[in-house]
Amino acid sequence: MDRFSSSIASLSKLWLAILLGLALAGCGGRGGDIAYDPPGFGAPDPLENKLPQLPPVLAPGDVLSIKVYRVDDLSGDQAIDPAGRIKLPLIGTVQAAGKTTDQLGAEIAQGLGARYLQSPDVQVLLKTPMLRTVTVDGSVTQPGLYPLATQTTLIQTIAMARGTTEGANPRRIVVFRTIQGQRMAASFDLETIREGKMADPAIYPDDIVVVDGSSLTATWKLILQSLPIVALFRPFG
């Protein structure tokens, strides 16, 4: 999470941890105050409506369109590699991740102007951003961030995290999402979904999916032990 959106997530880490801890306090079966598959738990708000309009910060996986005016051989599309770099004719490897498109364009122009071109005019555009992600945590085999390239469901999301652990409670999976400006949570019963008795819900970029059970991180366990159990849930913000 080294992109601008990760900075927004880090600001809300503390309250999300507290809310998640309270939401998952009751283990071993259905229960708690988060409704199961409630009506109105649809698509989240568009990301652009809730983030300040700042220049994009580049990251591995981004595809860039680089234009060196009047020098077509030096222009074209480039994908930022996993190390955060691109490789350009004449000037070689350039670090791109962590910079804005304007900063990168200025650095490329400086490199070309130092030895090869007189006053080069360089434009860098973000053509294809890095894939958006979903966070999967709790009692899953491999918690973490997973890219969402296409329409994804809850079962598919759990599968990306290599399934639930031995101590998981598949009857209580909590999904956190922003809808109409409010932080919302809903519970889903994975066993009922697998039996075809409940629809497999769609999972969207920026969702947080947490599987109840015994294989919670030390942070979650500490929160569960130290905080009072109160009914905070349904919409919250």
Image (cartoon, rainbow, N blue to C red):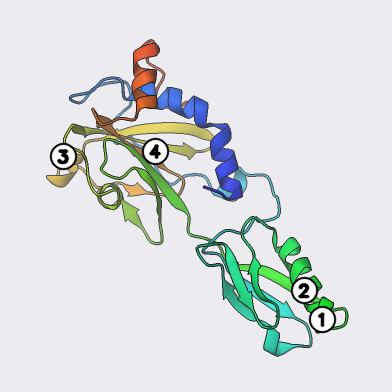
Label 4 – label 2 distance at C-alpha: 53 Å
Discs 1/3, front: 1
Q: Which of disc 3 and disc 1 is earlier in sequence?
A: 1
SS label for mark 2: helix
Q: Which mark is residue 192?
A: 3
SS label for mark 1: helix
Dividing the picture into quadrants, the one containing residue 191 is: top left
The residue under the point 48% across, 39% down is 179
Query: Mark 4 packing: few (<14 Cα in 10 Å), some, or many (20+)?
Result: few
Q: Looking at the picture, how far across and down is residue 161, in whole percent?
A: 29, 48
Q: Disc 4 marks which residue?
A: 40
Label 1 – label 3 distance at C-alpha: 66 Å
Label 3 – label 2 distance at C-alpha: 59 Å
Q: Disc 1 marks which residue?
A: 115
Query: Mark 1 packing: few (<14 Cα in 10 Å), some, or many (20+)?
Result: few
SS label for mark 4: loop
Q: Looking at the picture, how far across and down is residue 89, in whole percent?
A: 66, 83
Classify 200 as above or below 90: above
Classify 195 as above or below 38: below
Query: Mark 2 packing: few (<14 Cα in 10 Å), some, or many (20+)?
Result: some
Give the amino acid type for the residue marked by disc 2 in the picture.
Gly
Q: Looking at the picture, how far across and down is residue 85, in whole percent?
A: 59, 66
Discs 4/3, front: 3
Q: Disc 2 marks which residue?
A: 111
Give the amino acid type for the residue marked by disc 4 in the picture.
Gly
